[in-house]
Amino acid sequence: ITGLLNEKIREILPVMVEETTLDEAHQRGAIALFEPKYKERVKLVNIGEFSKEVCGGTHLSNLGEIGLVKIISETSIASGVRRIEALVGEKALKQGEEKENLLKTIATKLGTSEDGILARLQEKEERLQNQDRELKRWQEKSVNSKITKMLEEAEEIGGVKVVSGKWDNLSAEMLREVAEKLKAKLKKGIVVLASVSPNKAFLVAASTQESLSADKIIREVSRLAGGSGGGRWDFAQGGTSESLKVSPALEKLSLIVSQLLHKNR
């Protein structure tokens, strides 16, 4: 659209305005976008052979006076009607210059030419993806080595194995996977894990027993950690912005389980 408009601007098409009736304008093929608002007599604007429409008028005697047009947005304002906003003349030129300068700055930061920006960004994206995969492999090794130890050190309360653990900056996806792995190794038990970063923590709970609802347990642990949580009886998750409270909250897990077991008797 921008290319077509600027092509017509360069043709310096004349703009002619005449007064006629709305019916006559229709008969001559004019576009009338806001027909309910028009009176019997209207202004018909002709732009060469390119455009003919009913309009309030224009400040131009020919399209060349616009100089340059650059569309900056397009939105829907009604069914089948789009609103186009554009910059023209010096403002359009200035925006083009600003974007050109921005591209030059980006190219310099990336150590490439303007034509090479996309390729360099793709290289960086691939490098980040490889680093993410490597980090995930490292996390999996670290986690798997700890699972056996966590099971061995699990406390047993009323025949229920209680497993808890905490990692720094473990992904939410990995934390959920570990919780499910631990739960699968328990005949009767509850698992509560946390991933902690400086400003937040993510928690999950997994249960083998409906009477030991993961939803109830994660709600209480998250509350003690200054956050909130919830979910299903078999799996739930929570979070907090007070990461320093996570360890003290996990230390209360055995007490929480004991209280639930006592209520269910």
Image: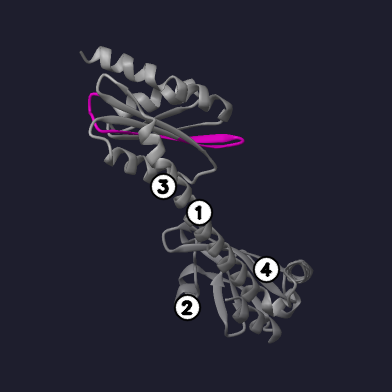
Q: Residues within 10 Å of mark 3 (few under 14, many from 20)?
A: few
Image height check: is 185 above or below 249? below
In this picture, residue 136 sits left or right of residue 192: right
Whole-percent x, y for residue 171 in the image: 48, 46
Whole-percent x, y for residue 132 in the image: 53, 58
The first of marks 4 and 2 along the sequence is 2
Are the two marked residues, 1 and 3, in contact with CB atoms closer than 8 angstroms?
Answer: no
Image height check: is 84 above or below 14? above
Query: Is any atom of residue 38 visible in this view?
Result: no
The first of marks 1 and 3 along the sequence is 1
Q: Label 1: state its secondary structure.
A: helix
Separation of marks 4 and 2 at Cα, in angstroms = 19 Å
Nearest-to-viewer mark from 2 and 1: 1
The first of marks 2 and 1 along the sequence is 2
Does the magenta run of residues contain 26?
A: no
Are the two marked residues, 1 and 4, in contact with CB atoms closer than 8 angstroms?
Answer: no
Separation of marks 1 and 4 at Cα, in angstroms = 67 Å
Whole-percent x, y for residue 147 in the image: 39, 41
Q: Label 4: state its secondary structure.
A: loop
Q: Which mark is residue 138?
A: 1
Whole-percent x, y for residue 61 in the image: 72, 76
**Taken as a whole, is the magenta stretch helix, strand or loop?**
strand
Q: Residues within 10 Å of mark 4 (few under 14, many from 20)?
A: few
Q: Label 2: state its secondary structure.
A: loop
Amino acid type at image mark 1: Trp
Q: Which mark is residue 144?
A: 3
Amino acid type at image mark 3: Asn
Which residue is label 2 attached to?
29
Report the magenta residues as a range. 194-212
Which residue does the image show at 51% across and 22% down from the upper left? 248
